[in-house]
Amino acid sequence: MTATYARKQSAPAGNTPDPVKLAVLAKALAHPARLGIITMLHEKQGCIGCDIVDQIGLAQSTISEHLRILKAAGIITGEIDGPRVCYSLEASALEPLRLLLNGITSSPPQPQKN
């Protein structure tokens, strides 16, 4: 999605998710390691960064970059606890994506009128 496309869009009506917000979420989720982090945070309801490194099995610097991307998209939060950062999932941030997917999967496609 380009910035030009985003500028041409009008405000979404009703429960229609904002396409720009959806694109940000989709981009943040578009990596297996980030999906693994989200799954881990969902299961444990919060983790310290070093636990995530151990569980996912990537270098600390790589995990830090994935955490930065997820945090920038609003999918996770990080709270400083002494020398460590405790991360938690903000599941509500994924609501626009859930609405889109539910809408696509729950209703049959409408025939186009010519």
Image (spheres, rainbow, N blue to C red):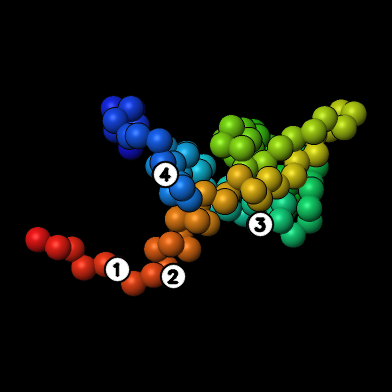
Residue 110 position in % (x across, y down): 27, 67
Q: Residue type at mark 3?
A: Thr
- Classify 105 as above or below 19: below
Q: Are marks 4 and 3 in contact (CB under 8 Å)?
A: no
Residue 106 is labelled as 2
Q: Earlier in the sequence, mark 4 or mark 2?
A: 4
Gap in Å between the C-alphas at discs 1 and 2?
Answer: 10 Å
| Residue lying furthest right | 82
81 sits to left or right of 56: right
Q: Are marks 4 and 2 in contact (CB under 8 Å)?
A: no
Q: Identify residue for label 3.
A: 39
Residue 109 is labelled as 1
Residue 62 is labelled as none
Q: Residue type at mark 4?
A: Ala
Q: Earlier in the sequence, mark 3 or mark 2?
A: 3
Gap in Å between the C-alphas at discs 4 and 1?
Answer: 20 Å
Q: Residues within 10 Å of mark 4 (few under 14, many from 20)?
A: few
Gap in Å between the C-alphas at discs 4 and 3?
Answer: 31 Å
For label 2, the SS is helix
